[in-house]
Image (cartoon, rainbow, N blue to C red):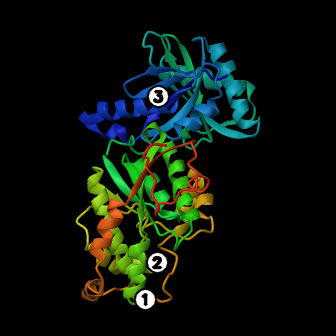
Amino acid sequence: MYERLLVRYGDLNLKGKNIKYFIDKANHLIREKLAGINVGYDFRHDRIYILLHDNDPQTVIERLNRVSGLYSYSLISKCAVNMDEIVQLALEMIAEKTHNLPTTFKVETKRADKNYPLTSQEITLVVAGKILSVAKNLIVDVHHPELTLSVEIRNDGAYLFIGQIKAMGGYPVGIGGKGLLMLSGGIDSPVAGYLAMKQGVEIECIHFESTPMTSIESVQKAIDLVEVLALYAPHDKIKIHLVPFASLHSDIIANIPESYIITVMRRMMYRIAETIMKKNDCLCIINGESIGQVASQTIESMKCINLVTQALVIRPLAVFDKLTTMKIAQDIGTIEISNRPFEDCCTVYLPKNPVIRPNVEMTEYYETLFDYQSKIDQAIINTKTLMLKAGKHFDIIGMGLTVQAGFNHENH
């Protein structure tokens, strides 16, 4: 029944003189995500028609749901500009949606072909009247209808669609530069990365691993999460920088009072992340912190921890509640991976009573109790980078690799 898919841009329409740049980026991502599917393209200045060529529309929509910068889709059916043909096609489309159950509806018409003898309002009245004479389950409601039939009269035919399917929204990924995502194995940070990409920020990831203090399975969790996030990235690829953190982790546990361990650990992570960020031409650090969720995420804690870096730190989840974050994690396919029972260095050896309002001067004093800078430098030198691709599973456990021992490749 459906011949093409109408794709609408989202917030791009607010971009004024820069709109062409944003649209070109979105169109490039569309072609990239639909590679391998035999579809055609009809690009207009404010929308795209994707010619389905008998492909399953749902397959196309699932791919497009990975493209940020799109607002919505509508499945289009086409017929000749003939009232009887328009009404017959409309009735088939309405029956598919309503299953002949009582439904409120209205008709909206756009006459793109100004040479057509009837006005948009006249077309609406004719089509609606003929539909109502046949479909007795329909009730007119022009203000809040359950179903809206849209009819567009063009030179080459009549285009009909019902309603809109919500797309990813936001801006095309990459349009806003690149950020470094602090990726744990938990629920929050992958969602933060997804939301950053949705707003146009391309990401690389940094993961602090403490094998053998933590299990290699926790590293595999991070790798698997990146492979899911890569579905939304340009070329389906994202880099992850694996930082060997065990030596620094051990020194923190040995030298820092228990209540301040997480505060000092996070400050060390930020120092390392800022260096990795600059080395890889990232413009900001991104993380999954949410105000008050844990001791290190009170405003006082975040302020104390943030003092060690001059980098811009973006927290997409800052005001999210956990249920909202979990819903997004479910939707993007990361929650099952995050729920695997393998702890990372932020959750293992967790203090019983972590400080929630750390004193800055006290924190700085505790950091003088051991030589952390040499350990930071060594961790940065020994950081290993993987280029991960969606759908191409990198099994660090099966390959018998460990980050601490090192491995010699960036592309996988």
Q: Which mark is residue 258?
A: 1
Residue type at numbered disc 1: Glu
Question: Which secondary structure lies at badge 2?
Answer: loop
Q: Position of residue 99 (x, y in %)?
A: 76, 36
**What is the distance, in whole Å, between disc 1 and disc 3 at their CAs?**
53 Å
Q: Which numbered disc, 1 or 3, marks the residue that appears first in the sequence?
A: 3
Residue appearing at x 58%, y 46% in the figure: 393
Q: Nearer the viewer, mark 1 or mark 3?
A: 1
Q: Quadrant of the N terminus?
A: top right
Q: Which mark is residue 31?
A: 3
**What is the distance, in whole Å, between disc 3 and disc 2 at their CAs?**
42 Å
Q: Are marks 3 and 2 in contact (CB under 8 Å)?
A: no
Residue type at numbered disc 2: Val
Pointer 3 local density, CA inside 10 Å: few below 14, some 14–19, many at least 20: some
Q: Position of residue 376 (x, y in %)?
A: 31, 69
Q: Are marks 1 and 3 in contact (CB under 8 Å)?
A: no
Q: Nearer the viewer, residue 98 or 266?
A: 266
- Left or right: 341 as drawn, with respect to 369: right
Question: Which secondary structure lies at badge 3?
Answer: helix
Residue type at numbered disc 3: Arg
